[in-house]
Each structure stands twice: as C-alpha cells, then as structure tokens.
Image (cartoon, helix red, strand yellow):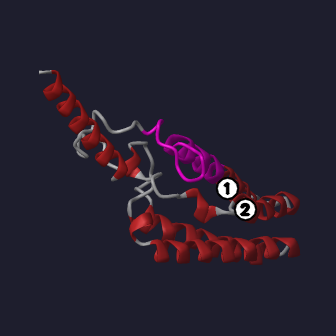
C-alpha cells in the first residue's frame, strides 16, 4: 500500500509541477472565486488597477479644473488673462504621459469602476491618434494663451475641447 501511495503522491507532484511550468494553476480559468482580486493584481507599472484608475482620474480632474478656469474667464466681462495663461500652461504639463495612464489590465475587465471603454485597448492606434490630437491642441492653447488675445484663446480653447469630445465619444462611457 505504501508503494501505491508514494506513486500517487509522485504523480500528483509531477502533475502540479507540469501545470506550474505551463502557467496553469490546475483551476478553471473561468472560476471567478479563484481569480485574483483587482487589488491583488499588479500592472507592469507596479500599480494595482484600482490605483491606476484613481491616478488617471486625479490627472483628468486637474485638467478639468484648468479647463473650468479658462472657460469661466472667457465668459467673464473682464477675463483674467494671467489666470487663463496659468491654466492653459498647466494642461500640457498635467497631460504628459497621457498614453501611459491606460496600461493593459486597467480597463473594465479589471473589475474596477472606470469610465474607460474597452475600445481603448481594442483600438490602440486610434486611441494614440486621439491623444496626439489633444496634445497638439493643448500645446497650441498654451502658446496662444501666452499672447493674451482673448478671441484667439477662445478659438484655441474650442479646438482643444473638440479633441476632448472626439476622444470621449469613442473611448469614454457617457458622462
């Protein structure tokens, strides 16, 4: 009986070793109870999906605050050009690395609440194009704001806002 048990134990160890070598766990890939929670998963950048979503939302809120400042000033009877210039200059800085805010594993599939749509990862070339459009427009807005011409700033602000809308239509859940 001991030989038989030893053979069974060796066979079980060999099977587990083989599964481990192949990257399998011996459990069903579809078994949600055994899948790691989003907090346990670590992305290539060292963050959990929840941390990544929180970080990118914080950056977008910073940019949103800058856009609100510009919008409010453009609507004012006496716009504060210095406030517009500071806000416009902050957008290219705050959006640096924008493409890196969406690493694989930080989308809806992670189980973390996010407004980012799967299309970001399904159509990376189009997403990169939208980011490039935004970055170019935000750079132009910052440069235009330096000149202080409220009319020109308004036009550049409209163009920049258009790039935001274009990206949101395709890659963000309705807001």
Q: Which residue occupies the foreground of this view, 96 or 11?
A: 11
The dot on residue 91 is 2
Which residue, given by chain and number where applicable, does mark 1 sit on? 63
Horizontal and vertical percent for residue 65?
68, 51
**Is 6 located above or below residue 170 in the figure?**
above
* Residue 70 appearing in the image: yes
Mark 2 is surrounded, within 10 Å at the Cα level, by few (under 14), some (14 to 19) or many (20 or more) other residues, namely many
Q: Which residue occupies the foreground of this view, 160 or 30?
A: 30
**Is 95 located above or below residue 8 in the figure?**
below
First in residue order: circle 1 vs circle 2: 1
Residue at 47% from the left image edge and 36% from the top image edge: 40
Do residues under tags 1 and 2 come within 8 Å of each other at their CB atoms?
Answer: yes
Q: Quadrant of residue 112?
A: top left
Q: Which residue lies furthest to the top in this view?
A: 1
Q: In this view, does 44 lie to the left or right of 148?
A: left
Residue at 61% from the left image edge and 46% from the top image edge: 55
Residue at 65% from the left image edge and 51% from the top image edge: 59
In which quadrant is the N terminus drawn? top left
Q: Is residue 72 left or right of residue 116?
A: right
* Residue 158 appearing in the image: no
Horizontal and vertical percent for residue 171?
44, 64
Q: Which secondary structure, mark 1?
A: helix
Horizontal and vertical percent for residue 50?
51, 41
Q: Which secondary structure, mark 2?
A: helix
In magenta segment, residue 73? no
Boundaries of the magenta span: 38-61
């Amino acid at each position: 009986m001991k030989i038989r048990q030893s053979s069974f134990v060796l066979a079980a160890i060999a099977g587990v070793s083989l599964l481990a070598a192949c990257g399998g766990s011996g459990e069903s890939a579809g078994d949600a109870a055994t899948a790691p929670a989003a907090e346990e998963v670590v992305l290539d950048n060292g963050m959990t999906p929840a941390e990544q979503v929180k970080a990118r939302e914080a950056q977008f809120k910073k940019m949103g605050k800058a856009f609100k400042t510009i919008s409010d000033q453009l609507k004012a009877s006496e716009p504060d050009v210095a406030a517009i210039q500071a806000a416009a200059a902050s957008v290219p800085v705050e959006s640096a690395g924008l493409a890196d805010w969406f690493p694989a594993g930080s989308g809806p599939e992670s189980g973390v609440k996010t407004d980012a749509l799967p299309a970001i990862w399904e159509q990376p070339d189009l997403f990169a194009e939208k980011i490039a459009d935004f970055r170019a427009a935000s750079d132009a807005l910052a440069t235009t704001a330096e000149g202080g011409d409220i009319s020109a700033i308004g036009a550049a602000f409209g163009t920049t806002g258009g790039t935001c809308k274009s990206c949101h239509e395709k890659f963000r859940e309705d807001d």
